[in-house]
């Protein structure tokens, strides 16, 4: 991974969001979806989770909470596939990244009320069998997510930490609640920023950024959709416990299975 990215194209969002994303590793963009879109996608998320939702986790049983997720909704025909390929969300992601992107995943998540388990402090890259210039998530709120409903908290600038660029997966499995700060002790002394979001807002974060999400102590479910983007030239880089059937190490991801943002309608 590289921390140096080319100049971003303009147009999707104001440059302040690009600056925040590059300096801090994340940014909060309000009103990414319209209220009508929020309602439509939220209903689709609830319907899909009710039919086929599965327990979510960070990989190899690490960091499980009561979160329920869809499974590869970005591949399946339907409304959630539209959200994974949303042209405005993709355009914002490409402007922030400054390079052509493709979708690697896209799923809805529901954290039920009363789930008092924090998401472990982590960086997404530790759990990614990928190698590329940049990997990022768009975390799209489908309901209001104040702090008590389990919004995201980040360690600003943690994407610029020194190598190793990720810890071994075994270390994360052995110490799921502390591997980020054990691997990079200086991060434990950095300021942390909690980011409440309104329905229709999104946070975009790079995969090297340390982050967590708090418990849902409210009386309503937290519902979000997470679209994962990689740069278009990303290659498959498996490591033990994180293999994807059908992919060959070192090969670039295919356009058919992992669509390019440039091809969104």
Image (cartoon, grey):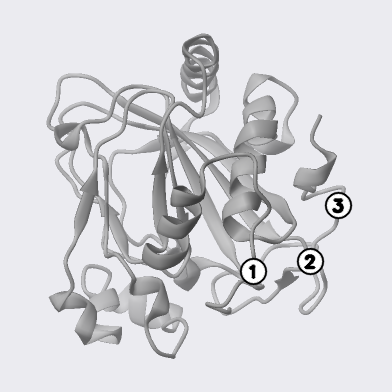
Q: CA distance from mark 3 to mark 2?
A: 13 Å
Q: State which quadrant residue 58 falls in.
A: bottom left
Name the quadrant containing residue 160: bottom left
Q: Does 54 sit above or below residue 2?
A: above
Rendered position, 133 above or below 204: below
| 92 or 264: nearer the viewer | 92
Q: Residues within 10 Å of mark 1 (few under 14, many from 20)?
A: some
Badge 2 local density, few (<14 within 10 Å), some, or many (20+)?
A: some
Position of 41 with respect to 56 (left or right) is: right
Contact? badges 3 and 2 (CB < 8 Å): no
Question: In the rendered image, which quarter contains the N terminus?
Answer: bottom right
Q: Contact, CB < 8 Å: mark 1 with mark 2?
A: yes
Task: Give the label, 3 or 1, closer to the camera.
Answer: 3
SS class, disc 2 = loop
Q: Secondary structure at mark 1?
A: loop
Q: Position of residue 236 (x, y in %)?
A: 72, 71
Circle 3 residues within 10 Å: few <14, some 14–19, many ≥20: few
Q: Which x, y percent locates residue 40?
A: 54, 11
Secondary structure type for disc 3: loop
Mark 3 or mark 1: name the one nearer the start of the chain: 1
Q: Name the residue tied to disc 1.
A: 243
Residue drawn 65% across the image and 70% down it = 6
Answer with mark 3 or mark 2, whichever residue precedes in sequence.
2
Q: Left or right: 56 with respect to 249?
A: left
- Distance Cα–Cα, label 3 vs label 1: 19 Å
**What label sits on residue 247 in the rendered view?**
2
With respect to residue 244, does 90 lie above or below? above
Residue for badge 3? 255
């Amino acid at each position: 991974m590289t921390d140096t990215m080319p100049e971003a194209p303009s147009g999707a969002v104001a440059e302040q969001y690009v600056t925040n994303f590059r300096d801090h590793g994340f940014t909060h963009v309000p009103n990414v979806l319209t209220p009508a879109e929020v309602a439509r996608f939220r209903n689709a998320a609830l319907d899909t989770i009710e039919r086929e939702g599965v327990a979510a986790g960070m990989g190899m049983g690490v960091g499980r909470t009561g979160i329920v997720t869809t499974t590869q909704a970005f591949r399946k025909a339907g409304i959630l596939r539209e959200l994974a390929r949303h042209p405005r969300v993709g355009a914002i992601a490409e402007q922030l990244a400054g390079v052509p992107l493709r979708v690697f995943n896209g799923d809805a998540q529901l954290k039920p009320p009363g789930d008092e388990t924090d998401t472990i402090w982590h960086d997404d890259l530790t759990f990614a069998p990928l190698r590329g210039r940049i990997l990022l998530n768009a975390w799209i709120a489908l309901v209001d997510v104040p702090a008590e409903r389990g919004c995201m908290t980040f360690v600003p600038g943690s994407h610029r930490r020194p190598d190793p660029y990720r810890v071994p997966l075994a270390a994360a499995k052995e110490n799921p609640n502390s591997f980020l700060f054990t691997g990079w002790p200086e991060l434990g002394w950095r300021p942390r920023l909690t980011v409440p979001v309104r329905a229709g807002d999104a946070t975009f974060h790079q995969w090297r950024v340390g982050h967590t999400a708090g418990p849902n102590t409210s009386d309503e479910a937290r519902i979000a959709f997470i679209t994962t983007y990689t740069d278009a030239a990303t290659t498959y880089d498996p490591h033990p416990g994180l293999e994807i059937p059908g992919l060959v190490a070192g090969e670039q991801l295919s356009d058919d299975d992992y669509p390019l943002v440039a091809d969104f309608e």
